Amino acid sequence: MRKLLLIGIGAGDPEHVTMQAVRALNQVDVFFVMDKGPGPSDLTVLRREICDRYIEHSQFRFIEVPDPARDRTADRYRSAVEAWREQRSVVCEQVIRQELGEHECGAFLIWGDPSLYDGTIEMVEQIVARGQLQFDYEIIPGISSVQALAARHRIALNRVGRSVEVTTGRLLAETYPGTSDDVVVMLDSKGAFESVPADGVEIYWGAYLGTGDEILIAGDLADVSDEIQATRRRAKNQKGWLMDTYLLRKKLGPTED
């Protein structure tokens, strides 16, 4: 039976790859490459660098999977994403059937961890649910950009007795989570931190975490918000794409516990 691996490869540093992931990489015959968003050449190069570094044979091959265009003008965000993911699953099912032999192992190399704001698990489950293609699959966890952000800023995500919320820039722009003093924000294309009342809030921001282009900025939100936005614009203009993650942290008073 065909086997499919969903391998988390970390936030960008090849040394983020775990020993479990290395063992998984060495099982793979076919790597399916479907990059999200702009900058696919950089991301593909990093994937190949990881494979060249850790795979002990040369019999594997890379297959590029055409990524369906996503409707970013739709009024209903969730419906648009679900339709796009359904299209992706159909395309991937066709490619897996054509390119992966009955007794071969295929893999998707996933930035960060497959469980955090990545649709590959859902895509695979959709293929399985249709019942037209039989295969077994396994998920290999990886170091997420959230973990990399905390490590690079030398902070813990949580404070004693406090929760941490992970959200998106789109949701943050709508409302700041009222129940969490520590909020990790991902998938922020516009800098939604500007919508947050800055008084008493710190930000720990990072872009291209784990790569040679890594950028880190931290401080009171009121003091560094403009610097971060200018840095984001400059970096995106230079590279053509941007991956960033940040933590918003409310300062606690001396009597808060």
Image (cartoon, grey):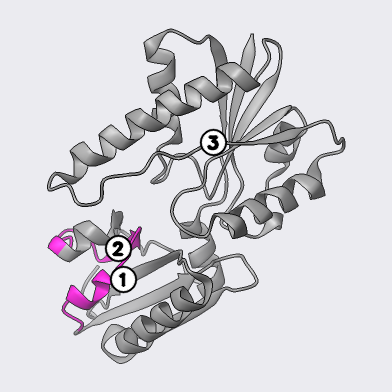
Q: Residue 160 at x, y = what percent?
A: 35, 62
Furthest toward the right, the residue is: 57
Amino acid marked by disc 3:
Val
Q: Magenta residues, as a range?
A: 174-198
The residue labelled by disc 2 is: 183
Give the camera-side residue of 129 and 222: 129
Question: Can I make out residue 175 in this image?
Answer: no
Question: Can I make out residue 4 in this image?
Answer: yes
Query: Is residue 196 within the magenta segment?
Result: yes
The residue labelled by disc 3 is: 65
Q: Is the residue under label 2 in contact with that under label 3 (CB below 8 Å)? A: no
Mark 1 or mark 2: whose residue is earlier in sequence: 2
Q: How many marks?
A: 3
The quadrant where residue 196 appears: bottom left
Give the camera-side residue of 225 and 157: 225
Mark 3 or mark 2: whose residue is earlier in sequence: 3
Element at label 1? strand
Q: Residue at x 87, y 38 (%)?
A: 56
Element at label 2? strand
Q: Residue at x 45, y 67 (%)?
A: 242
Q: Is the residue under label 2 in contact with that under label 1 (CB below 8 Å)? A: yes
The circle drawn on residue 248 is: 1
Number of other residues with Cα within 10 Å of mark 3, as a class: few under 14, some 14 to 19, many 20 or more: some
How much space separates mark 3 and mark 2, taking CA atoms? 34 Å
Give the camera-side residue of 184 and 130: 130
Nearer to us of marks 3 and 2 is 3
